[in-house]
Image (cartoon, coloured by chain):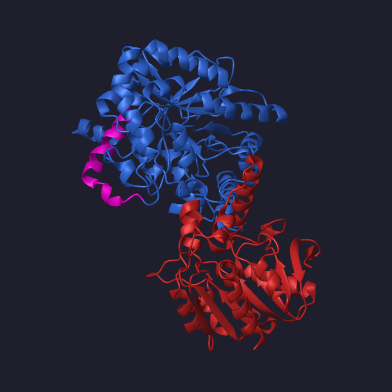
Chain colours: A red, B blue
Amino acid sequence: MVQEQMVAVRDGMFNVKLRTAGSGDPLLYLHGAGGLRGWEPFLAELAKRFRVYAPAHPGFETSTGIEHLDDIIDLVVFYNDFLDTLGLASTHVVGHSLGGMLAAELAALSPHRVRKLVLVSAVGLWLDAHPVADFFAMTPEELARALWFNPDSEVARAMMALPEDEQAQLEAFLLRNQHLATAGKFLWPIPDKGLKKRIHRIKAPTLILWGQADGIVPPVYAQEFQRRIAGSQVVVMPHCGHLPMYEAPEAFVQLVSDFLSG
Amino acid sequence: MKACWFHLMPYPYLPDDFKQKYRSVWVDVPSTLYDPEKGHWVYNEYLDELEFADQVGFDGICVNEHHANAYGLMPSPNLMAAALARRTSQAALIVLGNSLALYNPPIRVAEEFAMLDVMSGGRLVAGFPVGSSMDTNFAYGQTPATLREKYQEAHDLILQAWTRPEPFAFNGKYTQLRYVNLWPRPLQKPHPPIWIPGGGSIETWDWVLERNYMYSYLSYFGFKHGRRVMQGFWEAADRKGVDRNPYRAGFLQLVAISDTDAKAEAEYAAHADYFYNRCLHVFEGFADAPGYRTQATLRRGFRPQVGARAMRIREGLTWKDFVEQGYIIGGSPATVRDRLKEVVREMNIGHLMVLCHFGNMPKERTLQNTELFAKYVLPELHTLWQEWEDHWWPQPLARRAQPGAAIEAKAERA
């Protein structure tokens, strides 16, 4: 069963919502700008083979302390403190989108903490010829088209649906606004914050996963990450957009588990 | 009360199918739509109109700052104010204002405002807006979540630069200066009056009241909507035990005067349509970046005045609707005068900012509108609020330099 708790870091300067489950090697999952909606099915599957730690970053859900963080380096320092608090000397790290950028930074700046690294549809690099989409300025319809290989699929419609109740709609809007405002501290206006100066220091074996139809971070970035991380491997997943762990959860879990266990 | 003539300086040559063809008048509006040769005439006519407002007796003239847009052609309002400082003689120069977080380092604002204050002999009003989300977050790349903190820090730096007599070091989060030493210093003491333009952010009210600044609510929805906001402002004043001096507040209103009520529609309806449907046609995604407004302000129901929601509210409104719902106060001089008096009384407004030009209004119509206002409305407005003192108005030198005097003196000697 998943355990949900608030973890105090640096004497309560940060209070972070943490979901944990499973046993086995530790796996830290770092979510993207959309946040987690709860104990996601793909996390439950991973928890069958790993001890999964899925925190909500400061500024997401009820996690506090975002006012103490100004940029991605501050966030890496925070995660070092967080892992110290949990007593985790090292762990596998899986990061998606914003979380992928964070995972890559953590692996570059604190290589001793990262056993194996999985980057999923990660931001953090920039190619003039292939700009990362400005998802901060997208309407919900544009966002749906960019996020999903099939925006009409059951999972896509369920995730993009608005609650019926007006008050719940307002709360959903406010939560999304809070999450994107937080993400903006690390990504605005262009998600290129110096990772290219540090990425060569990644020593962990690295798997790079990308959806074939990613409309947020074009798949060409998979090659760019691979080019910059020695010995890394790329798998481009068919019939997936920016969210392969939701659009093809079984394949995603299989690929991640095999890579981390191998 | 005081009445100030505000120019937004829109680009008046957007195509008729602009709204259908382009998603936004701001941020990504193609600059190929701008013709600099036409722009030359536009700037000069607009400046003429502001100068005319000074000549016919408006208390102040206002300019403001916007970027990457066809809504308002003043990326640098200080350039406009500089031009006006030399060609006007009486009106307060109201720069509404400089978006503080966009200046690097923001000491630039302290310097340029001091220059304007000295050049104009102390006629400057210093406006400190946060700036719209389109301008600050999208056109100038500022992080939405930290924009207001950066603005506050810039404000603190400018105030210190204006008032501290010795050079000092400023160690801010966003600006570090080893030596802050302002040359020139502003003429008005301790500094020019500070006006804070707001679009309806609840934190702004307390901040303005605590510092004894002037709050000016720039609404495009007219007074019916503005009433709700100003009520919030005055309630905040009551909570803080601050008096209800109407000069603490300003309000923006579109005005359209003709000989008769019926003629107003014929003379102004097309320009109102241009304003609401082209100048305010802003893509939803640019209207309100996540983090630009605080969660508390959003929870209170404040939403941007542009973007899809605002456009839906305005969709299909006719001239009659615009007038009835108070977006525009239009009609004969008597109609406009009576309505305006009622509005400023009800909202308790000491500084009225009027848009006698909006949309693609040609200069003849603009001058007519301005002249009728000055002749029939202004004298009546001046009789209001005589029991209150305006602490937020510039204090110019009694004796001021006459532009061109040195050249005239030389000619006389010859």
Comparing B53 with A230, the one in front is A230
Residue under the point 41% across and 12% down:
B335
Q: Is residue B38 magenta?
A: yes
- Decide if residue B114 is on the left or right side of residue A41: left
Percent x, y for residue A188? 52, 60
**Which contiguous range is marked in magenta?**
B29-51
Percent x, y for residue A198? 55, 79
Comparing A174 with B369, the one in front is A174
Residue under the point 55% across and 29% down:
B392
Is residue A257 placed above or below A62 in the rendered structure?
A: below
Residue under the point 53% across and 23% down:
B350
Residue at the limit of the structure toward the left, as seen here: B414
- Decide if residue A145 is on the left or right side of residue B19: right
- Decide if residue A196 is on the left or right side of residue B363: right
Q: Is residue B197 visible?
A: yes
What predominant SS class does the magenta segment belong to? helix
Q: Could you tell me which quadrant the C terminus of chain B lies in?
A: top left
Is residue B201 placed above or below A132 in the rendered structure?
A: above
Residue under the point 31% across and 40% down:
B11
